[in-house]
Image (cartoon, rainbow, N blue to C red):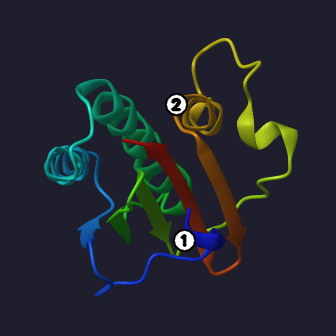
Amino acid sequence: MRGGGRIQAGERDTVELRIPAHPENLALARLALAGVGTLAGAGEDVIADLKVAVTEACTNAIQHAYPEGAGRIVIRYRVGSEALEVEVEDDGAGFDPSDPGADASENVDGQGMGLMIIRELTDEARFESDDSGSRIAFARSC
């Protein structure tokens, strides 16, 4: 990811999507990613993996940032010369990304594995969170 910096709306080769934090809007996040990925020339396997990653990141915001259901998610897609980058941002309740329980990869009922899945499906992933919200950023080579 370009020097670890945030993706800014209005940057060249960037698409920003703002959606209400509702499960029925996950399809919009995946469709936008598929469109951007196709235009970037990403392979079907890359697009499929990133669709799973963006779904996990958005689901994390829906379930944890906004447990009462009122909020929005901002998703930014950026086409780099060698990678497709994605950021998912919310302004809800934060979490501690360094807490081993945040990953919950040992959880047998399938809950709490989103961060681990994102790490596994991408070439690079960063997790930031505090009282003002969370940002999950990841990239995959095209």
* Residue 18: % across, % down: 26, 72
Q: Quadrant of residue 101?
A: top right
Amino acid residing under circle 2:
Leu
The secondary element bearing badge 1 is classed as loop
Amino acid residing under circle 1:
Gly
130 relative to 63, above or below: below
User: Residue at (29%, 35%) from the top-left corner?
Assistant: 47
**Nearest-to-viewer mark from 1 and 2:** 2
The secondary element bearing badge 2 is classed as helix
Q: Quadrant of residue 19?
A: bottom left
**Quarter placement of the C terminus:** top left
The answer to whether residue 123 is left or right of residue 142 is right
Q: Residue furthest bottom?
A: 10
The numbered mark at residue 92 is 1
The numbered mark at residue 7 is none
User: Residue at (62%, 39%) from the top-left corner?
Assistant: 115
Q: Residue furthest top?
A: 108
* Residue 135: % across, % down: 57, 66
The numbered mark at residue 121 is 2
Residue toward you, 139 or 57: 139
The answer to whether residue 124 is left or right of residue 62 is right
Do the residues bearing badges 1 and 2 touch, measured as CB atoms within 8 Å? no
* Residue 140: % across, % down: 47, 43
Q: CA distance from mark 1 to mark 2?
A: 25 Å
User: Residue at (57%, 35%) from the top-left corner?
Assistant: 114
